[in-house]
Image: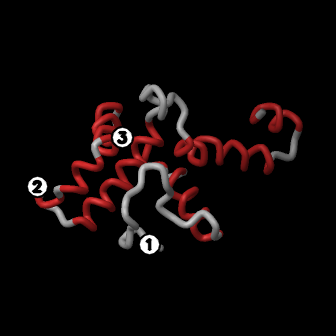
Amino acid sequence: ATASDAPSFDPTGQRYDQTTFQGRFCRMLLLCDPTLLFYSEASARTYGDMVTNYQQLIANPAEVGETAETIHRALWEAQRISSASLNEGTAVPHPFRMSGYVPFNGPICVAMVASKTTPAILFWS
């Protein structure tokens, strides 16, 4: 499964098959994408509204000038952006996002492991 061949959109389902390693890996790869940090609260809310009104988009893809396949792909991307940025129940923005974990914590973890002296370990702790 690649980004170009998206299944039909289902807001309660997963884009990739979660019974396979590749599907779970693709899901985590998309969740940890650092580019998700650059979406503003307003754009995340717009994508969230798009996911909320998905039935209308799927029913009339020609109304927005797109094909059904393009609409399904856009809906999966909108769900990814809104779920990474907004709390599902309250739609309040997440102050700390999973997509920031690797770029922010990765260098610190590497520095802690690579430190050889006690002061250096204490500094990175």
Q: Which mark is residue 2?
A: 1
Q: Position of residue 104 (x, y in %)?
A: 59, 41
Q: Which mark is residue 63?
A: 2
Residue depicted at 54% across the width and 42% down the height: 100
Q: Tell whether 21 sits left or right of 2.
A: right
Q: Are marks 3 and 1 in contact (CB under 8 Å)?
A: no
Q: Which residue is mark 3?
A: 39
Q: Are marks 3 and 2 in contact (CB under 8 Å)?
A: no
Q: Tell whether 16 sits left or right of 8.
A: right
**Which residue reaches farthest right?**
118
Q: Position of residue 114 (x, y in %)?
A: 79, 50
Does 52 sit above or below residue 95? below
Q: Are marks 1 and 2 in contact (CB under 8 Å)?
A: no
Q: CA distance from mark 3 to mark 1?
A: 23 Å
Element on which disc 1 rests: loop
Q: CA distance from mark 3 to mark 2?
A: 26 Å
